[in-house]
Image (cartoon, rainbow, N blue to C red):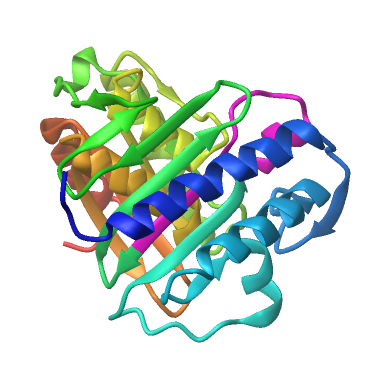
Amino acid sequence: MDFKFKKETKLAIEAVMEGERICNLSYSPEIVNIKESLRDISTIVDLEIEKSIIEKLSESKYPILAEESSHNLKPKIDFMKPYWAVDPIDGTVNFINGLDIFCISIGLCQDNSFLLGAIAFPLYRKLYSTMGPKVAFLNGKPLIHKHRKIEEALISASFSGKNFDSKKRNNEYELFGEINDLSRGCLRLGSAAANICFTASGELQAAYGFNAKIWDVAGAISVATASGCSSIIEISKESNSISYIVGSKTIVSEIHKMSINKGLFAN
């Protein structure tokens, strides 16, 4: 199959698989850095995986926005051109607490578009990937999202690690409760990329979050949209942050309307 970014897709898959290998060889939850909050932390494994991914992706011509190095180096990215968004471990708190829901995520982005994605779940032995903008895979098998109504849906939310606005934070919690009551449940799994990948493959029917970092979700949004999920996003390039709703079409629309009413999304 011929498609744009074929070489980059191969690099991304190879990079996350090498990251999985490193994770399984050196599973060490020792915290080495606390960044903006008690939930925004990194371990030696994060650093080792990110170093390996950067080395691999450097074979391409595109700049790399990676979670750990970006905190220190503040790379200048032209968001109107393709760039890599890398999270060596999304769900680090789960990782250090011995929970299985964490993943290694790579996405290629340009402006508000998500061009490709590769996400590996080391302890689940799951690899999500794209092959062009309309084809997604889980362990080599095609993914096609099955759209459902909100009353049939299990949904998951992610919350930013830092409280930027107390009023909006309260509104986020209120929204969480309202969605929980309208659906089969609203969860918080501790990994935004996992939420979105599980939405693509049907364990969940929607995932949403506010003020996430773009490297948390770039690869997963690529997979979800390629699987047929609807999505609504708002990106703040100044802070590398993103608010998103991804999943079944009518559910995304309903959550979007509710979010607008609570001042969490623009019209």
In this picture, which residue range is highlighted in magenta?
A: 90-108
Vertically, is 67 above or below 210?
Answer: below
Front-lying residue, 23 or 68: 23
Q: Position of residue 180 (x, y in %)?
A: 36, 23
**Is 217 placed above or below 66 here?**
above
Quadrant placement of the C terminus: bottom left
Percent coordinates x, y for residue 137 in the rendering: 30, 31
- The relative height of residue 216 versus residue 223 in the rendered view (above or below) is below
Q: Quadrant of the N terminus?
A: top left
Depicted 149 relative to depicted 96: above or below? above
| Relative to 9, 250 lies left or right | left
Q: Position of residue 140 (x, y in %)?
A: 33, 26
Tell me which corner region of the image, top left, top right, bottom left or bottom right, holds residue 135. Answer: top left
Quick check: is 19 in the magenta stretch?
no
Point 39% across, 76% down: residue: 237
Displayed quadrant of residue 181: top left
Whole-percent x, y for residue 29 in the image: 83, 38
Q: Judge whether residue 263 can be spotted in this image.
A: no
